[in-house]
Image (spheres, rainbow, N blue to C red):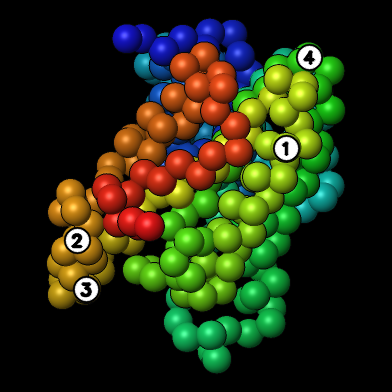
Amino acid sequence: MKIDVNGKVALVTGGAKGIGFDIANELSKAGTNVVITDIDKAAGNNAIQKLKQQGGSARFVYADVASDTDTTNLINNIIDQDTRIDILINNAGIISKGNIIYVTVSEWEKLFDINVKSVFMLTKKALPYMMQNKWGRIVNIASVAGQMGGGFLGNTCYGATKGAIISFTKGVAREAGGYNITTNVICPGFIDTEITRNMDKALYDKSLEAIPLHRPAAPSEVAKGVLFLVSELADYVNGVTFNIDGGLVRY
């Protein structure tokens, strides 16, 4: 079955590479006009070229998602050029490693600025336009670390940011649902990325043992979950924490 979100305007943060790029790619293939934002200009422009070569509609807008000014300018740019914003994918984030006793206050603040404050600001700024059009889809990318208190690559502080996103998603789902806006959160598990491929082999193997499917997820498998949540197949799915983790978290 082909999922069609033709003509919708979608913003994907952190969309230049990794899971974000795969999300932008899936949305583009489904007919969405995709706006990628990222702090890496070179990677962002390269991503756009790849999407256009495949026949997709995409453009890149630079923004630091932790900046109030940049996020305001980003939303204004989309409204000025596309007249609407239908889909918001809050994917941008950074990771933090190590025991909590070694994490500085500045590191904690940066982690929350990028992982949590950005989600708050962009959701707050995009919602009025979705409410005006009586339609919107918001998908926030958290992590199973938000349910487990860290683990694998992320530490306690990283897990705290992802737990905050899960809680925030449920609140927005309740507040915005009356406007035909759904808000859901995806919690990826162990994903096949450059970071995981460079892990210590013993830790890598141990991590896979904890996953019933005994393999990492491809970034595209997370992206397909996003596509489902923004499509008409998920019109009545709201406030859900959607794990894409191969069965890692079982409770």
Distance of label 2 from label 3 (alpha carbons): 9 Å
Query: Looking at numbered disc 2 in the image, what kind of residue is underneath it?
Result: Leu
Count how many numbered circles sit on residues in the image. Answer: 4
Distance of label 1 from label 3 (alpha carbons): 40 Å
- The residue where tag 1 is placed is 174
Asked if residue 180 is positioned above or below residue 72 in the image, the reply reads above
- The residue where tag 4 is placed is 133
Query: Looking at numbered disc 4 in the image, what kind of residue is underneath it?
Result: Asn
Q: Residue at x 59, y 52 (%)?
A: 166
Callout 2 secondary element: helix
Q: Residue at x 33, y 56 (%)?
A: 250
Query: Looking at numbered disc 1 in the image, what kind of residue is underneath it?
Result: Arg
Callout 1 secondary element: helix
Q: Which quarter of the picture shows residue 235?
A: top right
Name the disc covering residue 203, or none.
3
Asked if residue 187 is positioned above or below residue 229 in the image, the reply reads below
Mark 1 or 4, nearer chain start: 4
- The reply to whether callout 1 and callout 2 are in contact (CB within 8 Å) is no
Query: Looking at numbered disc 3 in the image, what kind of residue is underneath it?
Result: Leu
Q: Residue 198: x and y, percent?
A: 25, 65
Distance of label 2 from label 4 (alpha carbons): 44 Å
- The reply to whether callout 1 and callout 4 are in contact (CB within 8 Å) is no
Callout 4 secondary element: helix
Mark 4 or 3, nearer chain start: 4
- The reply to whether callout 1 and callout 3 are in contact (CB within 8 Å) is no
Mark 1 or 2, nearer chain start: 1
Mark 1 or 3, nearer chain start: 1
